[in-house]
Image (cartoon, grey):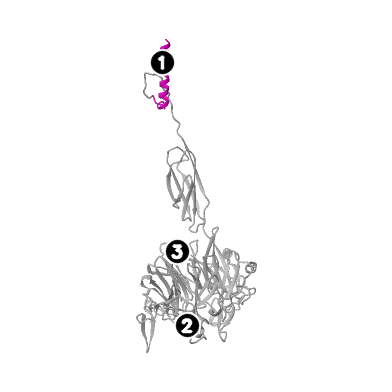
Amino acid sequence: MQRSRLPILVPPMLLLAAAALSTSAWAADYQPTVLVRFSGSAAAPAGASPITPPLLSADGKLYGVTQTGMPALGAYGQLPQGTAYTLDPATALYSAVALGDFGRNYGNLVQRSDGLIYGRTSASMFNASSYSSTLTGVPALLRIDKGVPTPIAPRGADQVPFYTTSFLPGGSAAIDANGVIYFSGGSSSLWRMNADESVQQLVNFRLPAYLKVVPNGTRSTTYYTKGDGSVIASVWSTTDQALYGITSTTSGVAGDPDLVPSGDKPAGTLFRIRAADIKTDGASTVEVLHTFASVRDGQPFTGDTNQTGLLEDGDWLYGTSFYHGLGTTGQMIDGGSVWRMRKSDPSTFQTVHHFRSDAATDGTADGDGSSPFGPLVKAADGNIYGTTARDGRVMNTKTAAAAKAAIGAGALFRIKVGSAADRADDVVEVLYRFDPARDGARPVGLTAGPIKNNVQKLYGATRYGGGDGNTYDGSDTIPGYGTVYSVDVSVPAATVSSLTASASSVTTGDRVTLSWTSTNASVCRASGAWTGSKAVTGSEEVTPLAGNNVYTLQCETAQGEQSATRSVTVKATTAVSSNTGSSYNTGDLKDEGGGGGGPMSELLLAVLLALSVFHRWRA
């Protein structure tokens, strides 16, 4: 099928138009600014139903993909077709291109240092004739160059394309400093894409050595101790030179059953693969750091509708689970959780918050978020932000079995990172609840944006809503095609709290001690009578020159936001000489002090001698 290359341009005012609806005072500071309201079709602004937030590129533009919005693919129209979109936040100019035979992207986009952006899918029509069945789609990779998408056939290290039902790329992707991309291949496998766009399998989570068979009456259950299903979240740690990731399925066999409480089920694993232990035959060494218990920890689950968060913050990992375990009949229990773990000590794994409890500002469980969805981000204010796909303001009223399920449009939450060494004082807060019509519904995570004037932009997307009249119908369904939005986060400004001198007036040559303190700064710089980079807090001895010496200090945040300057003046005065006169007694040639020595004294002596001789001659 021929792919459209003609971008659809939308005037800025059309994108920024939004209904002026009231919002509660506590949420006003975090109310999203809608940048795009998807049309649901090829009409501007083209696209519908994004499942990941846009990627902020090095060129300052936002790049993203939608799941639908273009004519479906396949003989029966069975495969949805989405768009690749570009949004310039500075001008609000939006353009979109149909994904064509690629269909739709699964999971997040990642960008290499050369500017190329990559995605993946398990269900395309690209080179479908090479595949044994096209009803469910063909695996393919995606390259986006300056907004233009191009499908890529999977190729091994020998550069020969391959097609197999066991390669189903999706899930979460991570990228290292060399541009190597790590991603789920489905079917309990982990793969990587190399710089030449070839792919290699790194892990087969179902190797015989990883299996544990447990008798169950007349039958037995096979557990996959390293994990199973898809790699649903991953992050590359440059510091550790290791990949951290999460596996999960709802089968109850993803993990070692001996590592979860009795009666609970293993729901997935948190693992680490060090760079030195990577192999390209599927047998890389996998170190399990934690086995999730479905009820105790929550269910980290993904798919085209669910995305799990994983974030590295120094020596800590933070993540989410989408559900709060499985019910007796196998149904997902509403809620989900936020957890953290120190990378160097897996025993520190701790649930920070179970959603549908008490994180809402109004203190009610029904107002809490539910089902955390998508990437977490660390903002410049030092806190971690995320979104939940639902909240408890609205409950399902159409299905008796789901009557206690939260179906509110979703929430923005913050993890206030604590100051304790073990971070036991972390606090989760719900900051804002989405309005289906005004903001969109079912937010899909966040991307950190730039900082200007001590305000950082966070960018996100919603999967549904965003249109006039979009509201609840009593079930989990919300009409509308989704939005792209931004949220402002105030970043503490750098300040020079104090700058003092040990003396304001000195004699030239005397030394003076300057002392200073600052807040929210990463570096300070001196100017005026002193120069150079300075510590954020400190003291330094200086020697003022004659006159007024103005010492100025300015500090800045780690993001380069500068503080106001602060100055202190020290006046240095030259000491006055004490002159006691000179003797003109020609019989006494010794120095009498008071500055009488030197060449001028010798000349005066010669004149006096000449006068003496002249007077004697006349006599």
Q: Earlier in the sequence, mark 2 or mark 3?
A: 2
Residue where numbered disc 3 is placed: 425
Q: Secondary structure at mark 1?
A: helix
Taking the magenta stretch, the answer to whether it contains residue 601 is yes
Distance from disc 2 to disc 1, alpha carbons, whole Å, reads 128 Å
Q: Mostly what secondary structure, the magenta segment?
A: helix
Distance from disc 2 to disc 3, alpha carbons, whole Å, reads 34 Å
Distance from disc 3 to disc 1, alpha carbons, whole Å, reads 98 Å
Which quadrant, please, contains the C terminus?
top left
Neighbour tally class for label 1: few under 14, some 14-19, many 20 plus, Cα within 10 Å: few
- Residue 612: assigned label: 1
Residue where numbered disc 2 is placed: 330
Neighbour tally class for label 2: few under 14, some 14-19, many 20 plus, Cα within 10 Å: few
- Badge 3 vs badge 1, beta-carbon distance below 8 Å: no
Taking the magenta stretch, the answer to whether it contains residue 76 is no
**Residue 534 percent location from the top left of the image:** 44, 51
Q: Secondary structure at mark 3?
A: loop
**Disc 1 residue type (three-letter):** Ser
Q: As displayed, is residue 528 above or below residue 44?
A: above
Left or right relative to 68: residue 352: left
Residue 115 visible to the viewer: yes
Left or right relative to 481: residue 555: left
- Badge 2 vs badge 1, beta-carbon distance below 8 Å: no
* Magenta extent: 592-619
